[in-house]
Amino acid sequence: MGYLIGLFLHGSTSGLTTLFLYITLAQSWNLIGGFAGYASFGQVAFVGVGGYSVGALMITLGLPFWPALFLGGLAAALFAGILGLILLRIRGPYFSIATLVAAEATSGIVEWWVGAVRSGNALTITTVGLREPTRYLGPYGFMLAFGILALFSVAIVALVARSRFGDSLVLIREREMLTAALGVDARRTKVAVFALSALLAGFAGGIMAFREVILDPTKLFDPSLTILTVAIVVVGGAGTVFGPLYGAVIITALSNLINSVDPASHDLIIAISIVGGVLASRSWLASRESQDGVNIGIRNWKTGKIGMRSVVAVGKDQ
């Protein structure tokens, strides 16, 4: 692990900035995909909504960056909540496809809005002169901002994992049909975690927007960002607190190593590594599911005592 960390520490602030961004996005996806079991391929929509909200607030209202960032994250969470009321009625590959379509549609709407309202001119955040709402953070400032956000995202996931809310998510992932019998409002829980997931992604998008200055839908709504995020979580370990962190370290270090040795084959080797990690993880999950039953740890819903859990063994034939 020390060798892997050294691979991106040697790079500069950009390597750490990228790592912190990946950790945040991975933890964002981990909430809905890892804990709840709903594999969303539309997380980039919340990155874009958060980024454009921050840009619009800073440009049109002249808000400083930090309050704009807070509101941008809330805008992404609100958008996810509304979207979740519709999309979270379905699950499995249909949900994944629906979120992918929603992300593309959101990107198209934003591009249309920029073309119609701004006459085709991109949103540009003022970072110099008397009209600057907030002084540009610079490389070290953005590295620190992404680092704080990464720590915040890990803390949020850790709190969720140790909470009754987290137990509800695990129950939804493993045996959603049991939620009603155990007093869990599955729909409300799914919408809540979808919004929380979007909040983190929206914060990341807001910082990205300020760093880029000129807002570009191809960057803030880049589908490859979602694919990479999912791969990081799967490689590191979905539904765990530190798995996405490990996955982000591995993918970032591997990317930097390949760039330093053979930049021409970078994309191909990264793609092969990601596919290998995904296949290995799927094989491990399949071996777990082949057992006689699935043990689901949930809290004692009647007493609500912290740490009190009951184990429900569910056979495959149920």
Image (tube, rainbow, N blue to C red):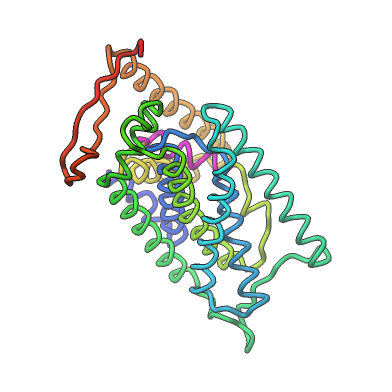
Whether 125 is drawn above or below 105: the answer is: below
Region of the chain picked out in magenta, as a range:
224-238
Q: Quadrant of residue 104?
A: top right
How many numbered discs sit on the rendered protein? 0
**284 to the left or right of 101:** left
Residue 35: x and y in percent read: 37, 38
Q: Quadrant of residue 247?
A: top left
| Left or right of 266 in this view: 52 | right
At a point 33% along the width and 29% down the height, the residue shown is: 181
Main secondary structure type of the part rendered in magenta: helix
Q: Is residue 260 visible?
A: no
Pick whichever, 137 or 289, lies toward us.
Answer: 289
Q: Quadrant of residue 85?
A: top right
Residue in the foreground of this view, choosing between 177 and 62:
177
Looking at this view, is 206 or 314 the one in front? 314
User: Where does residue 161 sit, x and y in percent of width and height?
Assistant: 29, 44
Q: Position of residue 159 (x, y in %)?
A: 28, 51
Residue at the image point whose x is 61% and y is 74% from the top: 58
Which residue occupies 61% across, 64% down? 53
The residue drawn where x is 51% and y is 62% is 74
Q: Position of residue 56 (x, y in %)?
A: 65, 69
